[in-house]
Amino acid sequence: MTFTKTIFTLLLTLLSLTTAFGQASKHKTKILLIGTIHFETPHLDKYELKTDDFLAPKRQKELEELTEILKRTNADKVMIEKPLKQQKQIDSLYNAYSQNKYKLTVSEREQIGFRLAKKLNLKHINCVDIFYGMKRDSLVSATAKEKNQEYILNELGGIAKNFLGEIDRVTKQNSITEILKYINTKELLQKNLSIYLKYYAKIGAGENYIGAEAVSEWYLRNLAIYSNIITQIDPKDKYIVLLFGQGHIPILKHLLQNNDDFEVVEVSSVLK
């Protein structure tokens, strides 16, 4: 009797462990976050990169090569940096492109996003952006002047200029695939985010915290984008490709890595 009870207890324990393991290894949607440069320089960012001619034959060939690599992911959805409120407009353009009735503009959203989605035979491309203006920028400058903290903004300006110069050099000397591999390294992603965390956050600290509030606006925009991303993903989706300006990626990556519905895929593992 004792032996039987022992076996029964062991079986219950094993069943419990198996159930727990099954829960721990639930399906996760893989999501590839690709930080990009803006091909068309839309003049929306304070610090911008001087762009190359991405419509030139050499670049078009590189875009074909890049999207052929990304096609191997067999992604269920492609998400781009276009406002959610423009979804109908993007649907119309993408539908026309799918029928060879629309010529892609220079935007990376179309050159990479549309091109990839068509190769994946997707019926739809997902818009997930939302724009929050950095409303405290002028207050940051005023506070820095009032509190003798202009040296912080001057240092930030020098760092940003060098950062963009570095990316500009890499852009001129490398293929689009190599550019994306470079700007999605851990070092470059951290360097972009540090502009906000290392410099902006100091302005007005201890008094009005204008710098911290300006940083919170950047985080708010990315949190809202994250909300759009996760609400447009179905539990059955196995793989998502997200294309967004490189500056957004560090925060979006952090948010998605801490949501156990997702497995963040490193760019370096796909663009080898």
Image (cartoon, grey):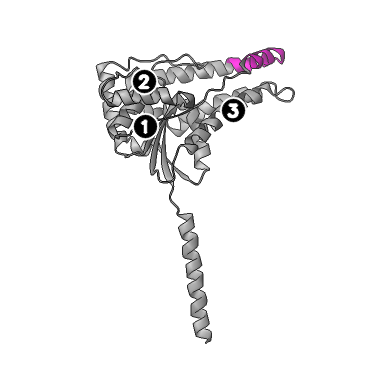
Of callouts 2 and 1, which one flags the residue occurring earlier in the amino acid sequence?
1
Q: Is residue 176 visible?
A: no
**Magenta span: chief secondary structure:** helix
Q: CA distance from mark 3 to mark 2?
A: 26 Å
Of callouts 3 and 1, which one flags the residue occurring earlier in the amino acid sequence?
1
Q: Is residue 242 visible?
A: yes
* Residue bearing the label numbered 1: 124
Boundaries of the magenta span: 138-154
The tag on residue 46 is none
Which residue appears at 52% of the width and 76% of the height? 9
Amino acid type for the residue under numbered disc 3: Leu
- Say which quarter of the image contains residue 76: top left
Q: Residue furthest right?
A: 207
- SS of the residue at dot 1? loop
Could you tell me residue 229's position as x and y percent?
A: 48, 35
Front one among 46 and 86: 86
Amino acid type for the residue under numbered disc 2: Thr
Q: Is residue 138 above or below residue 195?
A: above
* Residue bearing the label numbered 3: 197
